[in-house]
Image: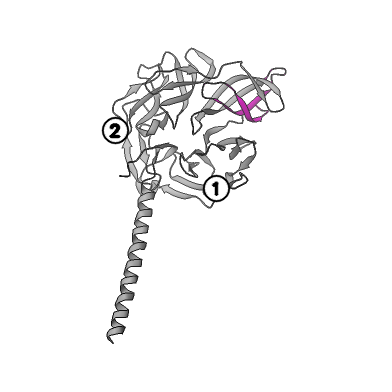
Amino acid sequence: MKKYTSFLFMILIAVSTLVSCQKDEEEDQETTEILDNSLIIAQSTVSQYVIVSPSTGIVLAKVQPNVIGLEDWVLGYMSQKAVITSKEPGGSFVKVIYTCSRTTGDNLFQVTSEDDFDVMQMDVSLVGPNIVFAAQEVGNESNDQIHRINEDGSGYQQLTFKDEGVVCPGRVATKMVFAYMPCWSPNGTKIAFNGKLREIDTNHPHDAVIIMDSNGNNKQVLFSVPMEEANYKDICWTHDGKFLIFLMNEGNDVKVKVLNVDNQAMTDISSHLMVNGLHTTNLWSSPNSNKIAFNKYEPGGGDLYVIGYSVTDTDQFVINSGYTILASHAVTGLHFGKPNWQIFPIDNN
């Protein structure tokens, strides 16, 4: 009887140790998931943005900067600031770039001048405080081009130019007309953008996805449609730099495309990102994982969805499974429009 009792006691200790180890592993896994070193910024109202944890969907901050209204929003380098565009307060309706405190909206700093540019879209590098932006020259409505500037207003440089020569696939000679939707590559060496081109010989329009060096050199057309308006939107890189993800128009449909940067192979993932039969209007890729954040087509952006993907050994882009809701309007009462994703350093000690 004594031996039997001792045997049972040893079994109980073993089971207890196993359960304790399993619990520790689960807690470690949960901690790792919560400490994802990135953040998502999204628009909640015309004047308020929200900061969302990409691991938990928790709203970490609701911020209303002291500006006329939000036109565009991204997180600054390492998410230390928010970078926003708004109409300047002088009544000109010109949109300028500001930086402000990520969590409070304080310390508002105007980066660009209303005398120079009416800013449309922008992105911030993962590797430095560098902003790339598409803008129209004030007083020259026919010159929409891409520029770069540092978060402190220094280091300005124009990167695309009206009428500069660009060669399309098939060695078709074209010239730049307009340039929009710039996006930094993960390592900060390249910028992808939407270029509106014209054939030099025939003046026929091309709508193209183009990459260039960070200083504007070596422009390369990766994908071109010989038409006026394919309207590539939300161009973003996967975190490994191998693919570009973007929206484009095909007739009356909005499609989500994935373009292999090296071989220009195209994958259509539109059906995976449709919610209740509605296509997405906004998307952005994670800077550190195989995930895409997006909204379905509805006013204000509504819910924030996330979907995962994988890349095969042969560089095929594959959606893993269905989407999930990361942050819900029904639960929080907030909208999560036009998400943008940025690295945020976390001290794990």
Residue 297, image x, y percentages: 50, 41
- Per the rendering, the mark at residue 65 is none
Is 46 placed above or below 35 here?
above
Could you tell me the amino acid type at mark 2?
Thr
**Residue at the extreme left of the image, as rendered:** 2
Q: Looking at the picture, tell me which residue is in the foreground, 246 or 308.
A: 308
- Report the side of 169 relative to 276 (left or right): right
Question: Which element is circle 2 on?
Answer: loop
**Residue at the extreme front of the image, as rendered:** 3
- Per the rendering, the mark at residue 104 is 2
Is 319 placed above or below 38 here?
below
Residue 216 magenta-highlighted: yes
Q: Magenta stretch: give its range.
A: 199-227
Neighbor class of circle 2 (other Cα within 10 Å; few <14, some 14-19, many 20+) is some
Residue 214, image x, y percentages: 51, 24
Question: Could you tell me if residue 76 is visible in this image?
Answer: no
The figure's colour scheme reads: one colour
Disc nearer the start of the sequence (2/1): 2
Q: Residue at x 62, y 42 (%)?
A: 267
- Per the rendering, the mark at residue 310 is 1
Residue 150, image x, y percentages: 41, 22
Residue 185 magenta-highlighted: no
Q: Residue at x 41, y 32 (%)?
A: 74
Neighbor class of circle 1 (other Cα within 10 Å; few <14, some 14-19, many 20+) is some
**Residue at the extreme bottom of the image, as rendered:** 1
Is 58 placed above or below 187 here?
below
